[in-house]
Image (cartoon, helix red, strand yellow):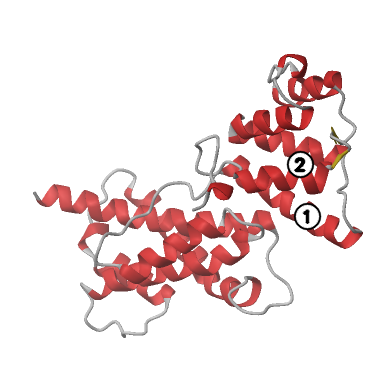
Amino acid sequence: MGIANKIPNGEENGLTNKEVLKIVNQWIGVEGGYLGDFSYRTHDEFWLEECDITVSTGWFEGTTRECFIDTLSKATSHQQADAVDALLERFSGVRSDEENQRLRAELINLVARLRTGTLSAHFSPGDNFDAVNRAIGDARELVKSSGGYQSAVDRMHTALHGYVRVLAKQNDDDLPEDADLVASWKSLLTHHPSFGGMSVRRQDIKKATRSLTAIIDVLNPIRNRASNAHPNELVLEQAEAMLIVNLTNTIALYTQAKLRESEKSAL
């Protein structure tokens, strides 16, 4: 990545330099050296009231714009989310109505990313799952972008499907090569030894995995009819797309954890 995309706060889901400049130049606006309607006083009050960050613009060696950029860049991701949320209330963009509406939607998605982070944990199936790893990598990048969760639905579905099908085939020779995700998941639960050794609250856990099966059953129609995998007229809202992506990731993590437990007990 070039310098324009560097993440100054060092957090995986933090604002990039490019995003910070877009917020400053295209949403707040800079005219005649002034940043929006901020004075030194209101600028400092903004950071204290919205993010509990103490800023003294008068002591900063630079303009209010430069002080704002420095503060926003160094803030934590959650503080950045609070700041952008407040900026959405305070300003309305400095370009055409259509461009401002598009940027508002992008900033709303940025807030969601800043508050929730990327995928909840790193699902890494290993070197023998090249296609799965590529899909996961794509998903991790997509959730950082505008509208990315709607596209990440497809990539996480692909990752889970590929992972589960390969594992299921290891212990079920009758499973078709082109088995769908539901068939692969049911085969995995039935035939893979990693899923046969539950003892604590066994019946409750079996109910939970059956619930996961019900969730998996709806992933395919959601992917095909309500994500950016296909040119659908209507796609999931941001919150629902985020739910589906993280549910898919959680199922993959659970599967991986069961395999690792089984491998350890076999040593």
Q: Please count the marks in the image.
A: 2
The percent coordinates of residue 187 (x first, y second) are 31, 72
Within 10 angstroms of label 2, few (less than 14), some, or many (20 or more) residues? many
Q: CA distance from mark 2 to mark 1?
A: 12 Å
Residue indicated by mark 1:
103
Label 1: which secondary element: helix
Kind of residue at disc 1: Leu
The percent coordinates of residue 46 (x first, y second) are 80, 25
Residue indicated by mark 2:
24
The percent coordinates of residue 37 (x first, y second) are 90, 32
Image height of 40 relative to 247, above or below: above
Label 2: which secondary element: helix
The percent coordinates of residue 244 (x first, y second) are 56, 59
Within 10 angstroms of label 1, few (less than 14), some, or many (20 or more) residues? many
Lateral position of residue 213 relative to residue 168, left or right: right
Q: Earlier in the sequence, mark 2 or mark 1?
A: 2
Disc ID at residue 144:
none
Kind of residue at disc 2: Val
Check the image and name the residue furthest to the left: 267
Lateral position of residue 237 relative to residue 160, left or right: right
Lateral position of residue 203 relative to residue 21, left or right: left
Image height of 70 relative to 227, above or below: above
Q: In this rendering, does residue 164 appear at all?
A: no
Q: Measuring 68% from the left and 64% from the top, which residue is drawn there? A: 236
Q: Nearer the viewer, residue 72 or 123?
A: 72
Lateral position of residue 196 relative to residue 138, left or right: left
Q: Nearer the viewer, mark 2 or mark 1?
A: 2
Q: Measuring 37% from the left and 67% from the top, which residue is drawn there? A: 132
Q: In this rendering, does residue 249 appear at all?
A: yes
Q: Measuring 64% from the left and 77% from the top, which residue is drawn there? A: 225
Image height of 187 relative to 98, above or below: below
Q: Nearer the viewer, residue 57 or 235?
A: 57
